[in-house]
Amino acid sequence: MRKVYLQDTVPAYQFHLLQKFSDQIDHAVFSRHGGVSKTPYDSLNVRYGIGDSHSNVDKNRQIILDGIGYEHMVSADQTHSKNVQIVDEEFLKFQPDGQEVDDVDAFVTNLREVPLMIQVADCQAILLFDPVRNVVAAVHAGWKGLVQNVSGATIDVMKSHYGCDPSNVLVGISPSLGPESAFFSNPEEELPKSFHPYIDSQKRVDLWEYSLAQLQEAGIQKNNIELARICTQLDNGQNFFSFRRDHGITGRFGVVIVLKR
């Protein structure tokens, strides 16, 4: 990833792989900086219902929209499910502006100028883009989402609904909980057998490598995946929120992708 300043003021990061297609898409991994929220949500918290004021979150989301240059966005009340929402004209017709979608952890669309936002603080935000079919997707994948293969479910929707070929799809994976930080009490019992090769002697799980393997199993080419390889917990709060590090009392940073006009 590379650091950028959107509208010369809002700090964010962009994937090199996706930036090559800046004529077709806008995308950004926002940090915790540039917003209005106070400690412990300082400052660009985009999540409602975790203790920050609704007004602050509204302002932070507007900062993000101003930064990427759009008026509205689609986001969800994420629940660690494998539920994928197709964002089409019919969906937008009945979805109130600014209201989060219930019980959804991934979005897929081919509509232009409809930003999709994922909110994370240790979980992976996975952005997908098919430059051939002009389709984008945004996925929230914590360890529970990885267990359910939410990224695979999203790719299935891209294939079945939009005719995407996974070998054409480009992927960016946000800063998230790294292999040195993903401790489990008893990972062999808590996680399916498919995770066991990714468990070390200290009961840590390499969720990064597991996610990479899962995406490749779904047909994504290895060279088409960019993993940030920044651990949110080891970041020590310098740039990103971490649920584990801050014992759940923290904000969420936003990760956005949108098709240009």
Image (cartoon, helix red, strand yellow):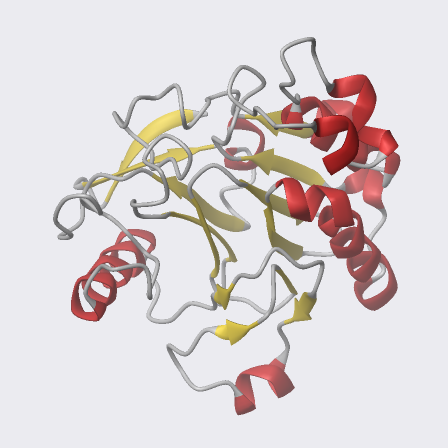
Closer to the camera in the image, 186 or 33: 186
Closer to the camera in the image, 169 or 231: 231
Viewed as shown, does residue 247 lie left or right of 139?
left
Name the residue furthest bottom. 94
Q: Residue at x 40, y 25 (%)?
A: 233
Closer to the camera in the image, 123 or 156: 123
Viewed as shown, does residue 165 lie left or right of 148?
right
Residue 185, given in percent of the width and then of the height, sits at 62, 28
Q: Does residue 175 sit above or below 68 in this rendering? A: above
Residue 256, given in percent of the width and then of the height, sits at 46, 51
Q: Does residue 250 sit above or below 18 in this rendering? A: below
Residue 135, given in percent of the width and then of the height, sits at 68, 57
Does residue 113 appear in this view?
no
Viewed as shown, does residue 161 lie left or right of 21?
right
* Residue 111 picture quarter: bottom right
Residue 22, given in percent of the width and then of the height, sits at 49, 42
Does residue 79 appear in this view?
yes
* Residue 259 picture quarter: bottom right
